[in-house]
């Protein structure tokens, strides 16, 4: 990506509601150039969607949960597909506000679910549903819970700070090429 596209993406991550004219002023470019660059970023998949990050506590959620899953044993491809279907079905049925489900590795775990819950009882129901082992596949779970109604937040969920990291990374790569 070119420097202009990095800047544009960073500005959009800070506030995706800004007009192309306002974005052009912020990154030192013309409005038509910004419009073309935004369209290119959308077409090439760098921008997947435009969204907001709400105050989840004001929406009635008290807990954000990072639930780590371990399948315990290596699964055959058919069992793995069954496990994926189980997780998708469970997440639809629990009513939990799940924002991410991904495979991965680390800490002896095989995947992670990030979800929001109205209260601890709702989280416990969610956890039990995920771990119950329907279809003969059981998951071991480990969780990290964050209270959303706390008065102190060290660095709340936002993408504004990520923009600084992206720009710094791009600048570093640019210097390394010289």
Image: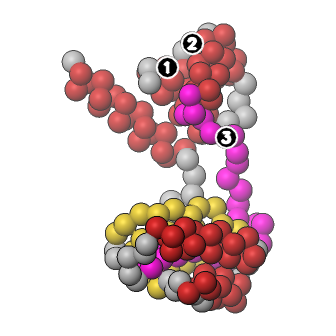
Q: Is 140 displayed left or right of 13 in the figure?
A: left
Check disc 1: other Cα within 10 Å, few if <14, some if 14-19, many if 20+: some
Look at mark 3 in the image and give the residue it sits on.
Answer: 49
Circles 2 and 1: CB distance less than 8 Å?
yes
Look at mark 2 in the image and give the residue it sits on.
Answer: 29
- Give the label on residue 67, or none: none
Residue 7's spot in the image, x, y percent?
50, 26
Nearer to us of marks 3 and 1 is: 3
First along the sequence among labels 3 and 1: 1
- Separation of marks 3 and 1 at Cα, in angstroms: 20 Å
Nearer to us of marks 3 and 2 is: 3
| Rendered view: 71 above or below 42 | below
First along the sequence among labels 2 and 1: 1
- Give the label on residue 4, or none: 1
* Residue at position x 66%, y 13% in the image: 31
Check disc 2: other Cα within 10 Å, few if <14, some if 14-19, many if 20+: some
- Separation of marks 3 and 2 at Cα, in angstroms: 23 Å
Report the front residue among 25 and 144: 144
Report the front residue among 11 and 35: 35
Residue 59's spot in the image, x, y percent?
78, 66
- Start and end of the magenta stretch? 44-71
Q: Secondary structure at mark 1?
A: helix
- Separation of marks 2 and 1 at Cα, in angstroms: 8 Å
Residue 75's spot in the image, x, y percent?
43, 75
Q: Is 111 displayed left or right of 48 in the figure?
A: left
Nearer to us of marks 2 and 1 is: 1
In reply to whether residue 53 is colored magenta, the answer given is yes
| Rendered view: 145 above or below 81 | below
């Amino acid at each position: 990506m070119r420097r202009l596209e990095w800047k544009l993406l960073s500005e959009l991550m800070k506030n995706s509601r800004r007009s192309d004219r306002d974005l052009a002023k912020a990154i030192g470019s013309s409005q038509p150039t910004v419009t073309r660059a935004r369209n290119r970023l959308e077409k090439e998949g760098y921008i997947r969607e435009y969204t907001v990050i709400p105050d989840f506590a004001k929406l009635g959620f008290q807990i954000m949960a990072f639930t780590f899953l371990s399948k315990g044993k290596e699964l055959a491809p058919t069992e793995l597909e069954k496990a994926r279907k189980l997780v998708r079905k469970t997440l639809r049925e629990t009513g939990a506000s799940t924002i991410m489900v991904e495979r991965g590795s680390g800490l002896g775990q095989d995947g992670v679910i990030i979800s929001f819950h109205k209260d601890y009882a709702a989280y416990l129901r969610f956890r039990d549903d995920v771990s119950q082992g329907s279809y003969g596949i059981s998951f071991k779970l480990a969780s990290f819970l964050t209270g959303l109604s706390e008065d102190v937040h060290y660095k709340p969920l936002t993408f504004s700070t990520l923009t600084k990291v992206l720009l710094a990374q791009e600048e570093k790569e640019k210097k390394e090429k010289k």
